[in-house]
Amino acid sequence: MTESETLKQETRDKPGRTADVLLKCAGLVKRFGERTAVADVSLAVAAGETYGLLGPNGAGKTTTIKMVCGLLRPDSGSVRVDGRRVRTAGGSAKRLLGYVPQDIALYPDLSVRENLRFFGRLYLSNKRELDRRVREVLGLIDLTSRAGDRVDSLSGGMRRRLNIGAALVHSPALLVLDEPTVGVDPQSRHAIMSSVHRFGREGVAVLYTTHYMEEAERLCDRIGIIDRGRLIAEGTARELVALVAERDRVLLSASGDLEAYAARCGDLARVDGASVTGEHHDTVQAVVRDARSLLPDLLDLAHRSGVHVRSVEIVEPDLEAVFLHLTGTALRE
């Protein structure tokens, strides 16, 4: 079994945690003018648990976690960390938080170690304790050998890891990460995901936002699916996949009027949803029951719709199928 498969299996085999709730969000609402970015979102994360907030860009993930971290004031609802209310003006709850934003928030002309010491001094006044934490974090993010190098000399993936390290120096009880692997190379992405997995095992509560299905499946004890500002489903990966029962996902790589074809697929019996997806918008994705017996009907409909099908793939139920089933569309990048 590969390391990736081992981590994924360990995560899926973790028992659910209901005690020691560290983060509790209740009825969060945030509006910008007439647009409601977050609509009545409630969730809880326990100590040692990694909770994934999964959704497309623009779904409300970043707005939600900015309210969690006290960077935005909710129009209604509340956020509590270890029973303490998070407020935009500060307070003891914020000292329990470590926040990793999407954008790199480091000083490029300082070294790796100097950045960690700077952020650590915001919370730690004891020099010996600060030095110990800086050494520990350098090891956690695998940058000990680059500790004296300036940030502007690091690769993008190394900067991402240091960005996480800066949020860890003060030993937060809750680590909030906003899509930390966006724009990094596969090797750095793997290193980041492996580190996040360790944080949860060491007792840190982790709130992790992503629009990558495989990250949510691999890392998260529980997953909340958010779309258009609403939390539409929540559970373990297995529990969420069970929502689509025996439904399969059929991927038809094709050319022609695919939007019209997808709409007509949705009218077929045993088709629960269909949409156009793929990097070049050249694939129709449908969630269906009993894909193999339904495939002739899908192909016949394609022929009658003037659509040329180049290839067909049948995929067993996964989170992508869950999202398509719940929203009627594929996960939008």
Image: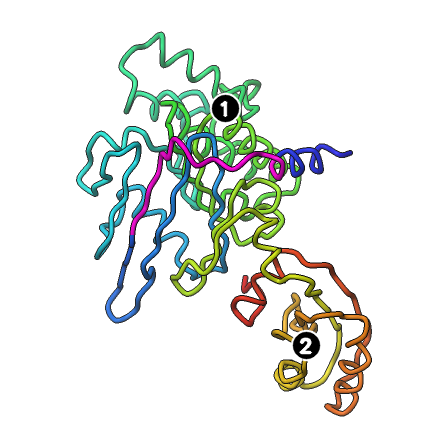
Q: Position of residue 143 (x, y in %)?
A: 55, 23
- On the image, which quarter does residue 171 sit in? top left
Q: Observer-nearest residue: 71 or 135?
A: 71
Q: Position of residue 333 (x, y in %)?
A: 54, 61
The Cα–Cα distance between marks 1 and 2, rounded to whole angstroms, is: 45 Å
Label drawn at residue 202: 1
Q: Residue placed at 61% from the left, 56% from the top?
A: 242
Q: Residue placed at 77% from the left, 65% from the top?
A: 314
Classify the position of the N terminus by image quarter. Answer: top right
Q: Which numbered disc, 1 or 2, marks the residue closer to the eye?
A: 2
Q: Observer-nearest residue: 99 or 118?
A: 99
Q: Is residue 291 above or below residue 166?
A: below
The numbered mark, 1 or 2, whose residue comes first in the sequence reads 1
Under mark 2, the amino acid is: Arg
Secondary structure of residue under mark 2: loop
Q: Observer-nearest residue: 291 or 191?
A: 291
Under mark 1, the amino acid is: Glu
Label drawn at residue 270: 2
**Magenta segment:** 11-26
Label 2 crowding class (10 Å Cα cut-off): few <14, some 14-19, many 20+?
some
Q: Position of residue 181 (x, y in %)?
A: 54, 44
